[in-house]
Image (spheres, rainbow, N blue to C red):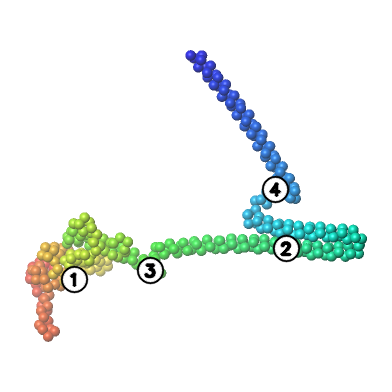
Amino acid sequence: MARKRAALARQDSAARLTAAEREVERCGAAAKSSAAQADSAATALSNAATACGVTVAEARSKLALPEVERLAEERALAELETARRDAALLANERQRQRADHHAQQRPEADAAEADAAANRLAESLTADRLRQGAARGRLTADDANRARLADLTVAIDAQKAQHGLWATLAGLIGSADGQKMRNFAQSLSLDMLLGHANRHLDDLARRYRLERVAGANLDIQVIDREMGDERRGVHSLSGGELFLVSLALALGLSAMAAGTAGGIGTLFIDEGFGSLDPDSLDVALSCLEALQAGGRQVGVISHVPAMVERIGAQIRVTPLGGGRSRVSVLSTGVAGTEG
């Protein structure tokens, strides 16, 4: 079995060797054919360059010219070739006419006609030279236009860079009156205000939380935690809920101003307590009492009788009629807010 396998392997190796030799022969033949084609192409290029009166290097440099210049030269050469053919046809015609005159033995007429033909040929040559000069002028104008276009391209790129700078600034600060920048700065302040207000809402109305409307700089909406975090407009709140939200915003604004120079030492709240139910009223007064305990002066303007027991110092205004009123200052001695 080993001998049989060895024999098969030897036969397979011999077959592969034969195939490899054939492939080498084929590649060699292809290489010779390619070399012959390259030599033939080089010879054809050399012959064509010689026929055109140029060297191979000059022909290659001409072929490397830009497409527009090459087309312009081709058009000029075509015009010159047309003029040459016209002149050749005219010369042939004059030679034929001259031969006819010689055949009729009219030497005087032949000489005059030859002079006229020579004059016409001279005029045709002058016209050809004028056309050649016009073609060169167009080429010169094209070169000048290209140079001017290059300068314009540089100026346009510089203008684009300048425009890009101003476009970036416009994207950052908006219009010339600064409205976009003001809205952006106010939106940052509003975010801070909502952060302070939400801390007070945790005490006043835990059900709600304030946030800015997406896509709007200064619009506010409420998140209803008891309705699956539903987003609602502030105007959808009841009178009491709206008062608590407004109170939270006022307290948040007071907290923000406390960190500035001078701060806000006294806070006045005008009405709104009458829209609260007893539990909400108790929560609101407790929050105000906590502010008073922290050193703030809180003044409450209200007609709600239930608040009298919670306010220690009171300024009562009693109408007397006839446009007259009496102001009295009372102190119940009960610990409460100061006004």
Any mark on residue 18, and which? none
- Residue lying at 73% horizontally and 58% vertically, measured from the top left: 82
Labels 3 and 1: the sequence-earlier one: 3
Give whichever of discs 1 and 2 has the lower sequence position: 2
Please tell me which of labels 2 and 3 falls first in the chain. Answer: 2
Going from N to C along the chain, the mark reached first, 4 or 3, is 4
Dot 1, how many residues are within 10 Å of its Cα: few (below 14), some (14-19), or many (20+)?
A: few
Residue wearing tag 3: 178
The disc at residue 268 is 1
- Most extreme residue toward the front, as rendered? 104
Q: Which residue is mark 2?
A: 131
Amino acid, disc 1: Phe
Which marked residue is nearer to the observer: mark 1 or mark 2? 2
Q: CA distance from mark 4 to mark 1?
A: 97 Å
Give the class, few, some or many, for how many residues have Cα within 10 Å of label 4's Cα (few <14, many ≥20).
few
Query: How much space separates mark 3 and mark 1, taking CA atoms?
Result: 34 Å
Q: Do we see residue 339 in this rendering?
A: no
Marks 2 and 3: which is nearer the front?
A: 2
